[in-house]
Amino acid sequence: DGGITQSPKYLFRKEGQNVTLSCEQNLNHDAMYWYRQDPGQGLRLIYYSQIVNDFQKGDIAEGYSVSREKKESFPLTVTSAQKNPTAFYLCASSSNDATFSGYTFGSGTRLTVV
Amino acid sequence: SQKIEQNSEALNIQEGKTATLTCNYTNYSPAYLQWYRQDPGRGPVFLLLIRENEKEKRKERLKVTFDTTLKQSLFHITASQPADSATYLCAPSSGGSYIPTFGRGTSLIVHP
């Protein structure tokens, strides 16, 4: 079955540490996205990539970094520069042409700073 | 700035009734509008996409309308069931890109 996998499901980070969230898809989608969701707020776009080896900042990119070396993978690093990283992180993928039929989301990673 | 409004209060309805959720947007002329369902602790699931030149779209018990004059989309679930209880997200996007801006969502609770 095709899908998108995020790992880990729960992640705890000490202040000052960088952590990397994994996102893998086998849907052959060109585009991948990272969102952050906080309680009572809509999803906010962190970074997105519409093709391998290229990515763009979203609305809240400060304190985050990404890479897109393979079509299937789009890892997100939460750096120590992110002042309030505790949140629910969601990865998504989609086609980015006329066949677009919505995003497929992963099941999310809940990051907590301890 | 672009603004998307969905009812922040939960919508409570009885099983079998039609649920209607509202999405209003301002300072925006979206070419597409998507609706997603999200269960607690899970990622959103895509339900329907409607384009600006489509007034209405249906999928099984779901119906979406898109009124570009009123700047509003309505999402209907007919013959609602307790299993329909979830948060529903509205996500309009501008032409040239499918990347949407997500609303905060409306919680739907269907009582047996």
Image (cartoon, rainbow, N blue to C red):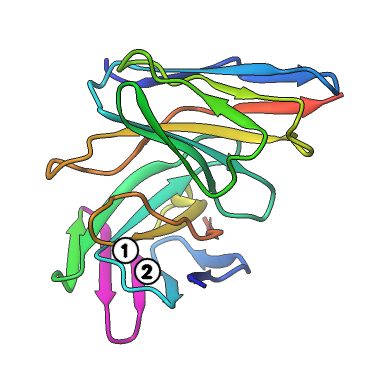
* Direction from residue A11 to residue A48 in the image, left or right: left
Which residue lies under the disc numbered 2? B18
Q: Is residue A28 magenta?
A: no
Find the distance from the CA under tag 2 to the CA under tag 1: 4 Å
Which residue is at a point 26% across and 71% down the rendered structure image? B65
Q: Earlier in the sequence, mark 2 or mark 1?
A: 2
- B76 or B30: nearer the viewer: B30
* Direction from residue B10 to residue A24 in the image, left or right: left
Which residue is at a point 44% across and 56% down the rendered structure image? B101
* Direction from residue B105 to residue B76 in the image, left or right: left
Q: In this view, does B26 lie above or below A29?
A: below
**Callouts 2 and 1 in the same chain:** yes
| Chain at tag 1 | B
- Disc 1 crowd, CA 10 A, few/some/many (<14, 14-19, 20+): some
Q: Is residue B61 magenta?
A: yes
Amino acid found under the numbered disc labelled 1: Thr
Percent x, y of residue A31:
31, 32
Q: Is the magenta stretch mostly helix, strand or loop?
A: strand
